[in-house]
């Protein structure tokens, strides 16, 4: 019997859950390619290390951009790498069943393409099940999705922020926004360019965000030293960035996300919004780790916000729950073929 897999193919991170074992892969969604030979050189951690350090003919790609599959062949190569890592010998009779997450706004054509890529990567025919990301996230956060009550989940990832109201095992209202963790990095990068005349890389911007971002009570005393390139002289330059800088840099996209949450609530039937007011909103995805975001949303919307225990793992844990209780969730699953 092959072990079945639950896969969270995120824009920033991909995680794989194996039935009976738990999470066995947690790597960045990055593929390094030799563009001359059109060959995949590395996937995941190994590929991420190559970013910014590669010779001209090697590029590092994130195959899922803004939550949609920007490049199918490369996505397939990435899936193949992960599936092969979990199953050293893949025979036809031992192909695993796979529960795989898809963004909630994906089209029928895109769904078919995900199934095909998953099959080509080694999954069992008739054994590929798609589950919408907010549903998996909600399951992974232990929300009672099968009950006749409204649950609201907000998943802020790298490329997209997905929010949904779930009741009776289905998504009642959802919204997917292309403003998420990557956007915050871009705003930090642009802010540093404008305010300090210094150019920094995306990885530095991400480091600044993780270390300093606080969107509720930014502290001017909290700072870090960062090295970039002076745009006037062209030489390397050290600058100090404060938590207040970061707040000013990311305020706009943070409020865009909050506006989208408000909009999703406005589209929610009144009975279910009453439940949400009572039960609160669950915040997950890497973006849930931004300090003070829960408090800011509470202050802006007036509903209690709970941060998931393991925001980076909610979705894959949700696919794991589905794998372990396949029969129970059958109606929730969008089956294929
Ligand atoms: P995806 O599901 O799209 O792959 P993830 O849920 O894995 O995304 O979250 C990745 C995003 O979360 C990235 O933009 C990353 O910078 C951000 N992130 C991770 N940890 C933190 C943190 N401690 N503070 C703020 N942002 C974080
Ligand atoms: Mg995700």
Image: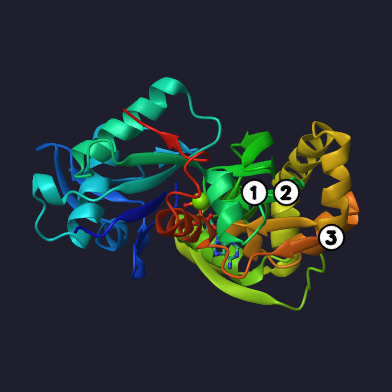
- Callout 1 secondary element: loop
Left/right placement of residue 158 relative to residue 212 reads left
Q: Where's residue 315, x and y in %?
A: 51, 55
* Label 3 or label 1, whichever comes before in sequence order: 1
Residue 215 appearing in the image? no
- Callout 3 secondary element: loop
Q: Where's residue 18, x and y in %?
A: 32, 62
Residue 146, numbered circle: 1
Location of residue 335 by image quarter? top left
Q: Please give the residue where the numbered disc 3 appears in the rendered image.
A: 304
Left/right placement of residue 149 relative to residue 202 reads right
Q: Is residue 334 above or below residue 189?
A: above
Please state which of residues 320 and 259 is positioned toward the viewer in this rendering: 320
* Label 1 or label 2, whichever comes before in sequence order: 1
Residue 34 appearing in the image? yes
Q: CA distance from mark 3 to mark 1?
A: 22 Å
On the rendered image, what quadrant is the C terminus found in?
top left
Please state which of residues 196 and 5 is positioned toward the viewer in this rendering: 5
Task: Nearest to the eye among marks 1 and 2: give it.
Answer: 1
For ligand 1, give the image quadrant: bottom right
Q: CA distance from mark 1 to mark 2?
A: 13 Å
Residue occupying the point 24% across, 34% down: 73
Q: Where's residue 206, x and y in %?
A: 53, 60
Note whether ligand 2 is within 8 Å of mark 1. Answer: no
Q: How is the image coloured?
A: rainbow
Q: Please give the residue where the numbered disc 2 appears in the rendered image.
A: 152
- Callout 2 secondary element: strand
What is the residue that sits farthest to the front in this orientation?
A: 327
Query: Around disc 2, counting alpha carbons within 10 Å, would you say few (fewer than 14), some (14 to 19), or many (20 or more)?
Result: many
Residue occupying the point 80% across, 31% down: 267
């Amino acid at each position: 019997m092959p072990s079945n897999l639950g896969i969270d193919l995120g824009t920033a991170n991909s995680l794989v859950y194996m039935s009976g074992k738990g999470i066995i892969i947690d790597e960045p969604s990055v593929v390094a390619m030799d563009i001359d030979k059109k060959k995949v050189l590395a996937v995941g951690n190994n590929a991420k290390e190559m970013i910014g350090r590669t010779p001209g003919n090697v590029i590092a790609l994130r195959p899922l951009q803004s939550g949609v599959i920007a490049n199918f062949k490369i996505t397939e190569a990435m899936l193949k790498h992960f599936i092969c890592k979990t199953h050293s010998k893949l025979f036809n009779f031992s192909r695993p069943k796979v529960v795989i997450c898809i963004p909630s706004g994906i089209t029928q054509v895109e769904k078919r393409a995900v199934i095909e890529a998953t099959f080509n990567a080694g999954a069992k025919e008739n054994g590929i099940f798609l589950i919408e990301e907010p549903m998996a996230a909600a399951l992974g956060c232990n929300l009672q999705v099968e009950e006749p009550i409204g649950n609201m989940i907000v998943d802020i990832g790298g490329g997209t922020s997905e929010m949904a109201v779930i009741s009776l095992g289905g998504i009642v209202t959802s919204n997917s926004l292309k403003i998420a963790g990557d956007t915050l990095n871009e705003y930090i990068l642009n802010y540093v360019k404008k305010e300090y005349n210094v150019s920094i890389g995306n990885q530095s911007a991400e480091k600044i965000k993780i270390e300093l971002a606080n969107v509720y009570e930014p502290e001017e005393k909290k700072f870090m030293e960062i090295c970039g390139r002076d745009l006037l002289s062209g030489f390397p330059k050290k600058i100090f960035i404060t938590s207040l800088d970061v707040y000013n840099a990311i305020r706009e996209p943070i409020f865009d996300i909050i506006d989208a949450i408000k909009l999703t609530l406005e589209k929610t039937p009144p009975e279910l919004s009453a439940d949400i007011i009572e039960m609160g909103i669950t915040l997950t995805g890497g973006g849930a780790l931004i300090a003070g975001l829960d408090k800011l949303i509470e202050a802006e919307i007036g509903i209690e916000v709970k941060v998931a225990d393991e925001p980076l793992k909610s979705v894959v844990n949700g696919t794991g729950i589905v794998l372990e209780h396949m029969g129970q969730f059958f109606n929730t699953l969008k089956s294929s073929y």
